[in-house]
Image: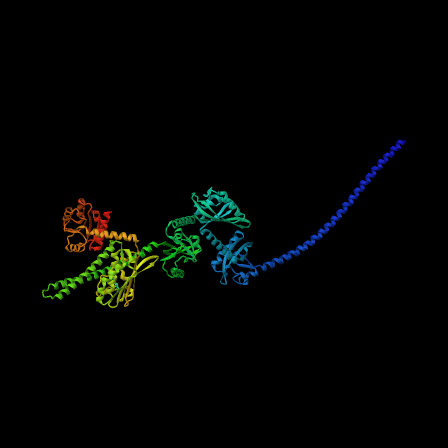
Amino acid sequence: MKKDTDKTKEQLAIELEKLRKQSKKREKELKAAIETLDANNQQLRATEQQLRAANQQLDASNKQTRASETRMRNLFNAMQDLVFEMDYNGTYLNIAPTSSQLLVKPAEEVTGKTLHDVFPKQQADPFLQFIQKCIDENKADKIIYPIKFDNKTIWFEGRANPIGNKRVLYIASDITERKHAKEKLEEREEKYRTIFESAKDAIFIMQEDKFIDCNEKTLEMFGCDREDIIGEPPYEFSPEKQPNGRDSREKAIEKINKAIEGEPQLFEWVHTTKDGDLFHTEVTLSRYMINDERFVLAIVRDTTKHKQAEEALRESEMKFRNLSESTITGIMLYQNDYWIYANPAAEEVTGYTFGELKQMKFWEFTAPEYVDLIKERGKARQKGKHAPSEYEFKIITKQGKEKWVFLTGNTTELKSGKAGLITAIDITERKQAEIELTLAKAKAEESERLKSAFLANMSHEIRTPMNGILGFTELLKEPQLTGDEKDEYIRIIEKNGTRMLNTINDIVDISKIEAGHVEVRNTELSVNKLLDEQYNFFVRETTEKGLELNYSPSLPDNESRIITDQYKLEGILTNLIKNAIKYTETGSITFGYSTKSLKGKDVFEFYVKDTGIGIPAERIDAIFNRFEQADIEDTKVYEGSGLGLAITKSYVEMLGGEIVVNSKEGSGSTFTFNIPYNKKSSKENSSKKNSEEESGVSLKNLSVIVAEDDETSRMFFETILENHVKRITYTITGKETIEKCRENPDTDIILMDIKMHDINGYDATREIRKINKDVTIIAQTAHALEGDKDKALEAGCDDYIAKPIEKEILFEKIRACLNKKSI
Ligand code: ADP
């Protein structure tokens, strides 16, 4: 039972549990239903709220619509544009109030009117067509047109919108400013395009490593079409390798990339044309940006011509340098008073290096006497005045040497400005030659003048005594002459003969001097004795003229011995004393000597002093000249050849001395000359004496043949030889001379005339030499020409003597020849 009870209980519990569970479930369901109810209520409330809100929104939106309507109206009213409605016939309907300012006439006047009422036909027609087209096609369209307004043209851009009812709403705005701005822009663009196209350089525009545009010049420069360039990479016209061997296309790309990065590039490049011809260029790359896009502008300048010009310049520079360095002409440039260039020849001329010249003003090496001239000319040229551009002047070289230069000056244009271009040639030698030539010319002219004067004088000097001689010889023939008259005539003839002989002697002497045939024959002599002889010779003449002649020796006889040419010393003194007498009318003539030391040497100084007419100062230098007299006119008064002093001076100089004159016109003259005091040692003196004596003795034993066809000359020989030799044989022809020589083998001397009728003296000598080698033959000739002596010696003569023969010289020669043979 229990079990049943328990079982029932259990069942009850299960039932209860079931019930409980059911009630819980119902409770849950109830709760859920209540919650749903709540939720529905809430939803209901929310919907209510939404409804209220929607109502509120509707209200607000109504308000908004009203506001926007107002705004639209305000906007319409406030619009600046021209706004109107127009029908198919072009009638103005609604016109926005503000449009009137863009209307030709006020809105109220236009409303209801047609386009043709307002505008002329040609304006109205196209506009009406436009409106009608919009309406016909029911499509909005745009129109731009100008209208003349208050003398201005206003550009409109309008849009017509069909709005139904065969109407359009037309809105237009004033685009005049925009239009002008656009025009300006277009103009500017045109300008830039023109520049771009007409540029002398090729201009490319690149973007992203490609050419996007280029100008005409580019096509011309690269010889291609636009299509060959546009879209191509930038290295398209670069050779693989640059001629310099270093750069390649990569280098060009590198530069473009740098430009793209904003770093402008400037470089030289060799480009190639489409046909492959290379040319030099200068390239500029720069970047510019448009709306963040990067472009590269490349300007390429063809520098081929420039390069060629540069090359030519370099070449001409090189040529100039070569020329300038190899020429012997000094080339110099100066600027702002300083030398800026000097070639080696200029260095040579001036003695300064270019480095030294650079520091010098341009006149610094000019000889002082030319500095002012050079400066003046420089200044004148700077002021644009004409100044000689070629001149000769002296410079002083660095070594202090004077040089003559021939200079040319020009202006040249250098990069640094104007410069003086100077060329200088050393003309020192030419200048010296010129100076010498001028002197020689003057001398030649002078000697020409003197020769004429001389000839005139000689003619006078020969004719005058000749007239005397011939005239009085003729008179002598008169049979009824008294003895005194005859004596007087003979005296006159003698005097004239002497005068003529003097003249002829002078001519012969000077000719010999000029021909260089005068030799100095030194012997020892006593000056005291020589001056005594002079005194004795002249004292009669001076006394006759009423003049005083004074002489007193300065040294004792033994000290007055010197070695000199006696003949010449005698000649000098004779000449001076003769002149003194000639040119002195009253007073005295004094002569003498003294010894002194001159320039460290002992000399004998002789003087001849007179109280005569003196010599004008301006003629003093001339009197020693050949053919010259103190006053040529004087020859008429004071006879003379004008050669005496020239001969005297030559003789003095041959003896190793000098002659001077001290004279004052009207107060007399003093001629002073010196000769070296050559003393002989006493030993030499005595030996000389002996030989002289010996020679003297030996002359006495001589057998002489005189070959001479001129009678006068024969008489002369007779006179001078008569008392000095043993035997004289005279022959007239060459043959006869040879014969006489053969007949007389003991003959010591033959005085052989050269000019004989049959065989001349030279040939006769040759013949004689065949039979007699020892006989002394002395040739004697009147020719006295250079070369005669040589011819004589060559023919076999021992010596030669010129006519007129002087006794002493002849004796001396004879002695010399014999001495030579006896050695
Ligand atoms: P000349 O034959 O004319 O005398 P010289 O050569 O001997 O020629 O002299 C040249 C000139 O010098 C003379 O003509 C004369 O005018 C001048 N003369 C020379 N000696 C004297 C002197 N003692 N007094 C003045 N004049 C002189």
Q: Position of residue 531 (x, y in %)?
A: 26, 60
Residue nearest the viewer, comparing 602 with 554:
554
* Residue 515 left/right relative to 331: left
**Above/below status of 410 relative to 7:** below
Q: Which residue is at the far right?
A: 1
Residue 45 image offset from top left, x and y in percent: 74, 50
Horizontal arrangement in the rendering, residue 667 relative to residue 357 (left or right): left
**Residue at image point 33% right, 55% down:** 432
Front residue of 467/32: it is 467
**How far across and down, in percent of the image, does residue 692 sit?**
24, 52
Quadrant for the N terminus, please.
top right
Hey, which quadrant is residue 661 in on the image? bottom left
Q: Quadrant of residue 79?
A: bottom right
Q: Is residue 145 above or below residue 274?
A: below
Q: Quadrant of ligand 1?
A: bottom left
Q: Is residue 188 visible?
A: yes
Q: Is residue 260 above or below residue 600?
A: above
Above or below — where is 372 with respect to 282?
Answer: below
Left or right: 513 as drawn, with respect to 163: left
Nearest the viewer among 616 and 708 is 708
Q: Whole-percent x and y of residue 792?
A: 21, 49
Q: Is residue 672 visible?
A: no
Query: What residue is shown at x 18% (from left), y 44% (from top)?
Result: 770
